[in-house]
Amino acid sequence: MAACHHHLFFLTLPRLVSALESQCQQIEGLSLMSQKITLHSWTMKLRRCIDSYADSLDKVRPNLGLSMRSHPLTATAISERNVILGAGSGSTATHSLQKALRLLGFTTSHYIDSHKHHQWALQILNILGGPGAPAVPMNVSTVSTCKQQARLFNYTSLSSSIDAVLDTPVAEMFFNIFLSFPRARVILTTRPSADWVKSRLAQDLDDGFVPLQEPCGWYLGSGPMMFNRTELAFLFDLNNDLVRCIVPKTQLFEIDVWKESKKQKDTIMMDLARFLGIRNFRGKHIPFPNAF
């Protein structure tokens, strides 16, 4: 009986049903049927989240959501690791979060800053067009190839020595990564969208991606599709809403240091430690790092 005590709402691949049947073949048919229903319900929830996201993208530009709407909701591989995923875009205090996680004892990789652990992120970035705008922009054909490669990439190849990954390309490829790590603990750093656009354009115009899922070759300052500030702010908010939609509440922790009071900031480290399962954390008076 214990073998069937899985959090089945995490399992997003239909092919996993057969694996569950093998593990639970000693359980009565009703129990197995309940598991299938739960799996189906979770898959349907993902589909609703993606369809809503795609519909909203279409409001920005016609057919902008077409690709996401056709997403198969599958991953090349699934890992049971409860890695920490930073779902927030760059310029949302991700460096601060990196410092906080390191204070809590987690090996944390941010963008490609870590020489020891940057290969995984670089592989994903190269699919999207590279860490900087390429000399030759992607066209319709290469964008299509990019999206296919993005969905076929084995995200579970992340080194076992890494506890947490933050910033680009995690935010831009979050849906595919979460499908691969359905037990992940997700930390969403965010800020007021207009402020985010202003900061991002000032700092990362050439190498910052448009804030949407699978932004193949779409940089803030170049690419096959250009967006104005209002559109970028809307896309930023949509991306955050997608994270809130697909991640179970028990697996999601949000931080917005621009909106929280000093008193709230003073408790972030304690709350974060509790969320990450750290018991007896002796950091009641440790403030959340300020690295922005």
Image (cartoon, rainbow, N blue to C red):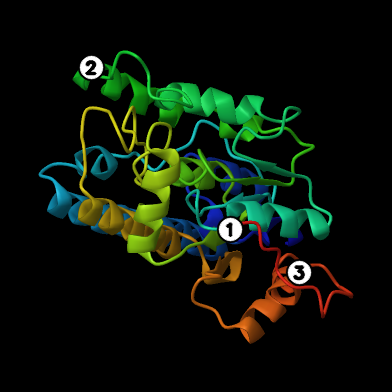
Q: Position of residue 143 (x, y in %)?
A: 28, 23
Mark 3–mark 1 Cα distance, whole angstroms, equals: 13 Å
Q: Position of residue 74 (x, y in %)?
A: 43, 39
The picture quadrant where one finds residue 79 is top right
Q: Which residue is mark 1?
A: 186
Q: Which residue is mark 3?
A: 273
Q: Amino acid at mark 1?
A: Val
Q: Position of residue 160 (x, y in %)?
A: 76, 36
Query: Considering only order in the chain, which callout, 3 or 2, is on the residue closer to the N terminus?
Result: 2
5 shown above or below 90: below
Q: Are marks 2 and 1 in contact (CB under 8 Å)?
A: no
Pick the residue in front: 187 or 202.
202
113 shown above or below 26: above
Query: Considering only order in the chain, which callout, 1 or 2, is on the residue closer to the N terminus?
Result: 2
Please, what secondary structure does the residue beneath circle 1 have? strand
Which residue is at 73% across, 32% downward?
A: 159
Q: Which residue is mark 2?
A: 141
The picture quadrant where one finds residue 288 is bottom right
Which residue is at 21% across, 51% downward?
A: 57
Query: Considering only order in the chain, which callout, 1 or 3, is on the residue closer to the N terminus?
Result: 1
176 shown above or below 262: above
The picture quadrant where one finds residue 217 is top left
Pick the residue in front: 174 or 70.
174
Please, what secondary structure does the residue beneath circle 2 have? helix
